[in-house]
Image (cartoon, helix red, strand yellow):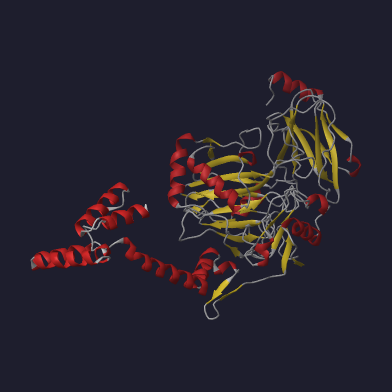
Amino acid sequence: NERRWESSWTTDGEGISIEKSVERRVARHSVPPFIRPKQVPSYLWYMTSEGKKENQKQEKESSPDQAKKETSLNQQKIPMVAFIPIVWAIIAMVITTFRSGYIQGFVEAVRTPEANGYCRFDPATNAHACEQRTSALFAPNGDSENATLLEIAADIDAMILAACKAVGVENPEIACAPHSGARLVDSRGTRVRKVEELIHGRAEPPIYVVPRWLHFIWPTVKVGHVVTPSNVKSADPENPMTITTLSLRPRVFKIKNFMSLKEAHDLIEHNKPRLKRSTVGATATYDRTRTSSNTWDISSKLARRFKRRAFAMLAMDHSEKLEDGLQVLNYQPGQYYKPHVDWLNPETEDMEGNLVPMVNNGTNRFATVFFYLNTVEEGGHTVFPRSYTHKGFDGNKVMRDGGPNPLPGYISDRDAAWACNISSSALRSKAIGGDAVLFYSQLPDGELDHESLHGGCPVLSGDKWAANLWVWNRPRDGSFRPKKRPNNQQQQSPKQQKPDGQIFFQVQNNAGFAVDVHWLNPNGEKAKMGTLETGEFLGLNSFNTHRFGATAKGGDNVLWTHVVKPEDEGNVAVILVPRKARNTITSSSNDPK
């Protein structure tokens, strides 16, 4: 192309012919029009003496107005090649500025906020001041008091194993083996995935060690301790979610700004038409201890959003197999829920499957997130009668009935009423719309927490809208369904270590009809333990001098009683009813009441 250009240029002697030759070449090679010689001042005219003379001749012949017009047109249309030096100058300036550190410092500041520690740019020295930590504090799951300073390992797997050994995890080679599910979680609920996060100070200490099979539990630290979880997106960016410790045992936390008021209102309106009377237990039976209305919201957009947010707040990956769905509740004036535990009792619950969390992949309810959808005018608190570590506790225990070792989940009617009385010093969480309360049904080591007794106080004015999410420690495989107990003696389930003085025994129904077995407190109130058909067995854990009784299924009159003695350990107490009473019951109804 270059030779062809030169040939056409030297062959033609006149400037006009040169111009025409160039035009033809431009058209042939599709060069953009802004570089065509007729539209811009072309340096080609000055490459030969003939071109210069012709240009001068044309300028003299042109009128002043025409020359002005051409000059203005030429000034407006500048060739792109003229911008090349400017572009290179800008690029050079950017490179120089970046190398000086100012832009790089800005990028680092955006990528790694100062609040998280990490590298900070120092304009005075044009350098970065990076925290290069060589050690970090590690603590057992949920326990901020027993932290240990450890040297940071070369990789995350080695760090997890070393931390497990340092904080006293049993069988660390198994519980904290690489890729076993063991993990590290920092004080704001964010999982630590790389040792660089420890080296540069991005993970906030202490770092909690969570062995396999277990889930992270928020540390209580102290009553009133406040933390802002870093892994949860707040419903209102101007009011971030906060977690405040209300009680050390049971572990109870107030969740501020869990949802927006609009979200709460929309959830109420979506579920209001579907309410029905609430039930209790895995077998969904009606009971006088629970008088509210409820419904289940499993798949609505809002329910899914609440569930994902709750799992993020718990520092857990969301899985439908780990939750029961969202239960929406409504309490009218006077309605309440007597204190109870959320976990299912492995001793008495009529359910298939293993309910002991740490034995043979057992699973049970791990945590409860209770959402307040509106602010109750008066009453409607969530009460924790067995909390003795909260602010305002005066040292007088709320639970006075039932002896020193009451059965799990039991509270007398008198104590339940006193717990909700504002004159008592029981822990009561006020229902404020948009907030929530979190409490754990399991301890950090996976054992069931008998202190997690809680209930809903009666609504005194207005009404109460709420929802709750039960989170399990392991997936349920479909075997968790109501069951009939076999007609042979049950063996004691593998359990966590029995408390001192606990006695395990069984009762067998030989009454000739179905009976309900109750624990009888010193005031004569009954706590139902289970229902037995004729010939069936029921295993019970109790203590010396505790009393049990049997009534006809659904009845009130106690037909048989038994006082627990140390020699009952491992033996069977047989339910027998006098013939006269048996004949009266069986003749009055085929299904005795």
* Placement of 67 over or under 232, stated as above or below: below
Report x, y in % for residue 41.
23, 63
Q: Is residue 15 visible?
A: yes
Report x, y in % for residue 339.
64, 47
Report x, y in % for residue 374.
47, 50
- Quarter of the figure that contains the C terminus: top right
Report x, y in % for residue 348.
75, 37
Q: Is residue 558 visible?
A: no
| Residue 410 falls left or right of residue 101 | right
* Placement of 269 over or under 243, stated as above or below: above
| Residue 569 falls left or right of residue 470 | right
Image quadrant where residue 122 sits:
bottom right
Viewer-nearest residue: 350 or 219 = 219
User: Residue drawn at (80%, 62%), measured in percent from left and top?
Assistant: 166
Image quadrant where residue 192 sits:
bottom right
Q: How many marks?
A: 0
User: Residue drawn at (62%, 45%), measured in percent from left and top?
Assistant: 338
Residue farthest toward the bottom in the current orientation of the protein:
124
Viewer-nearest residue: 58 or 223 = 58
Image quadrant where residue 203 sits:
bottom right
